[in-house]
Image (cartoon, helix red, strand yellow):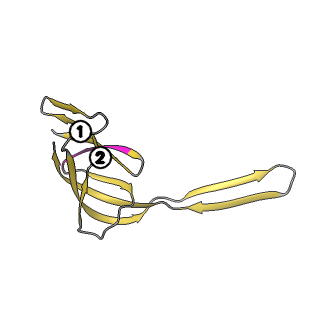
Amino acid sequence: MKYAVIRTGGKQYRVSEGQLVKIEKLAGDVGDKVTLGDVLFVGGNDEVKIGAPLVADAKVTGEIVGQGKAKKILVFKKKRRKSYSRQKGHRQQQTTLKITAIEA
């Protein structure tokens, strides 16, 4: 089974072909093809390619399955004995991506 470690949105993800991954929002509509070029590692089938920092001529392609928001995160601030409290919510934009091919 072939897998890769990619970098997108300031985070690293371990992906394999056919997998659904929720990542930071990418521009595009549902059904669009996306090519990710920041491949840090490719492994599987007794082959290993480690990048320094990126693997040369490697790319991961995928298809956008959905655009949405993550679960709500509550941010609560309080200062004791000062009658101060504040609560805010935040929902991060995210893209659901189906990995179609890993090329190295």
Q: Residue at x 63, y 55 (%)?
A: 75
Looking at the image, residue 60 sits to the left or right of residue 86; the answer is left
- Quadrant in which the C terminus appears: top left
Determine if the magenta segment contains residue 25.
no
Residue at (53% x, 59% y) in the render: 72
Type of amino acid at the residue the image marks with label 1:
Val
If the image is split into quadrants, where does the N terminus sit?
Answer: top left
Instruction: State the mark number for residue 55.
Output: 1
**Dot label at residue 93:** none
Magenta range: 12-17
Residue 15 appears left or right of 68: left
Which image quarter: residue 31?
Answer: bottom left
The mark total stands at 2
Return the x and y of residue 17 as percentages of the image width and height: 18, 48
Rounded to the nearest angstrom, the CA distance separating label 2 from label 1 is 8 Å
Q: Main secondary structure of the magenta part?
A: strand
Q: Is residue 78 left or right of residue 35?
A: right
Farthest residue, direction right: 81
Viewed as shown, does residue 28 lie left or right of 17?
right
